[in-house]
Amino acid sequence: MPSIVIVGSGLAGYTVARELRKLDRELPLTIVTADGGEFYSKPTLSNALALKKAPDAIALNSAEQMAAQLGATIRTRTQVTALDPESHAIRIGNEALPYSKLVLAIGAAQVRLPLKGDAADAVMTVNSLDDYARFRAALSGKRRIAIIGAGLIGCEFANDLAASGYEVACIDIAPQPLPRLLPAAGAAMLQERLAAIGVKWHLGTSVDALEHDGEALRLALANGERLHAEIVLSAIGLKPRTALAEAAGLALRGGIVVDRTLATNAPDIYALGDCAEVNGMVLPFVMPIMHAARALAATLAGTPTPVAYPAMPVLVKTPACPTIVAPPLPGAAGEWIVEQGADGVKALYRDSHGKLLGFALNGAATAERAQLARELPPVLA
C-alpha cells in the first residue's frame, strides 16, 4: 500500500503527522523535506537571541527522533521536483514516489526586493533554521544591522537585536510599523517603545540600492538618505510556495486553493499552512495551522472533517511593547475605536451595531486579551 506522503517538515507537516498518529498508528507515512527535518518552533527564530538560544539548541527533535516518534519514513535534504496527480506520485529527480494521499505543507518563501547595487545579493533572509544558523554566524563581530520591513517579523527581529545590544535601523515604505495589523495609535506606541531600546526608524521610504563600502554596506534610500550597516536583513513578507502546484495544474489564487477539508482540485492532494488558501484566506500564523492539521488528520484517517477557525489573536513578540492583535477579516465593515493611556493602547474594531470584529492591544491593554477574544466571532465557523 502506498504511503500517505507529506511534503514539508515544518509545523504544518509535522503537526498533521502527529495528529494522524493519534488516530491511526498503522497507516504508512512518509515525510519528504528539503531541509534537515529537525522539529522546531519557527516563531522562536525571531526572539532566539533574547532567549539565549544558539541555532543548534533551537531544534527540539532531530529527524531521526521524529521518525521514531511518528513511525514514519523521513527523507531529509530531498527536493521534490514535480507532482504527478495522474499517476499518484511525486517526482524526486528521476525517482517516482507513489502516494495514497498527498499533503502539501511546503510553506512560503521570503519575498525578495529587486535592489540595485553591487551588494544586492548580500541581503539575508530568515525563513528556516538553516537560514537562522547562517544569520547568527554572520552576526559574529558585527554591530550594525539594517532590517528592511517593519511588519510582524521585522519588528520582532528589531526588538530582539536591539535588546541584545545591536544597533538596528528599520526601514519600511509604510508610514508606521505593523501597517497591516495596527491602527495608528497602537503603531505609534510600538514605534516609540522600540525607539527607546535603540531602534532607528526610517519610515515612508524604501531601499533603492545596496552597495559595498569597505567592510560595510551602504543603503541608498528613496528619500535620499544613506545608511551604513554590516548586515542587511530583509523581512518584507512571505509568498506561498506554489510552483510545484502550478506545474501540476492545481488551482491557485493567493495560495494553493483548497476547500474546507483542505482538498485541492486534484484527487487525494491536500494542502495546509502558509502555502494554502482556505475560504479565500491565507493565514500564516501558528493557530490556523494547528486547527487545520487536526481537521486534515481526521480526513486522512477516513473521517472527512471541514476545518473551522475560532477567533485567533496573534501575539507579536516585541517585549519592549507587548502587542496582541486580532485583525478584522478582509472586507469587514466597521471602524477603530481607540482608547489611549500612558501605559497602553486599546483599539476595538466594531461594526455599525457595536459588534466587535477585531482588536489591537498594546502595553497594559494586552491584559484584556482573553475577555475580548471571547466576544469575537469565529474566523471560519
Image: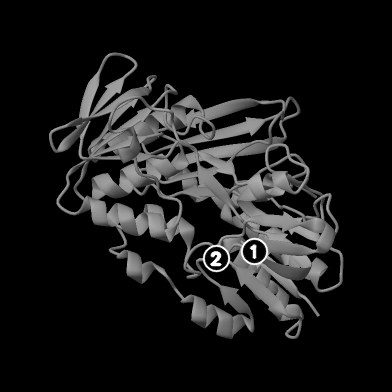
Viewer-nearest residue: 333 or 340: 333
Question: Is residue 271 in sight in this rendering?
Answer: no
Q: Position of residue 331 (x, y in %)?
A: 71, 28
Q: Which residue is at 64% across, 80% downward?
A: 72
Q: Position of residue 97 (x, y in %)?
A: 70, 69
Q: Residue furthest top?
A: 224
Q: Which residue is at 70% across, 79% downward?
A: 21
Question: Is residue 207 in sight in this rendering?
Answer: yes
Mark 1 neighbour class, 10 Å CA radius: few under 14, some 14 to 19, many 20 or more: few
Mark 2 neighbour class, 10 Å CA radius: few under 14, some 14 to 19, many 20 or more: some
Left or right of 338 in this view: 244: right
> Total label count?
2
Determine whether 140 is above or below 123 in the image: below
Viewer-nearest residue: 210 or 289: 210
Instruction: Kindly report which numbered mark, 1 or 2, lies closer to the viewer in this rendering.
Output: 1
Give the mark nearer the N terminus: 1 vs 2.
2
Q: Position of residue 123 (x, y in %)?
A: 34, 39
Viewer-nearest residue: 16 or 95: 95
Left or right of 244 in this view: 154: left
Q: Which residue is at 50% across, 81% downward?
A: 64
- Separation of disc 1 and disc 2 at Cα? 13 Å
Left or right of 53 in this view: 214: left
Q: Secondary structure at mark 2?
A: loop
Circles 1 and 2: CB atoms closer than 8 Å = no
Q: Could you say which quadrant of the image residue 229 lies in?
A: top left
- Amino acid type of the residue that numbered disc 1 sits on in the rendered structure: Asn
- Amino acid type of the residue that numbered disc 2 sits on in the rendered structure: Thr
Q: Residue furthest front?
A: 94
Q: Which residue is mark 2?
A: 78
Determine whether 148 is above or below 64 in the image: above
| Label placed on residue 94 | 1
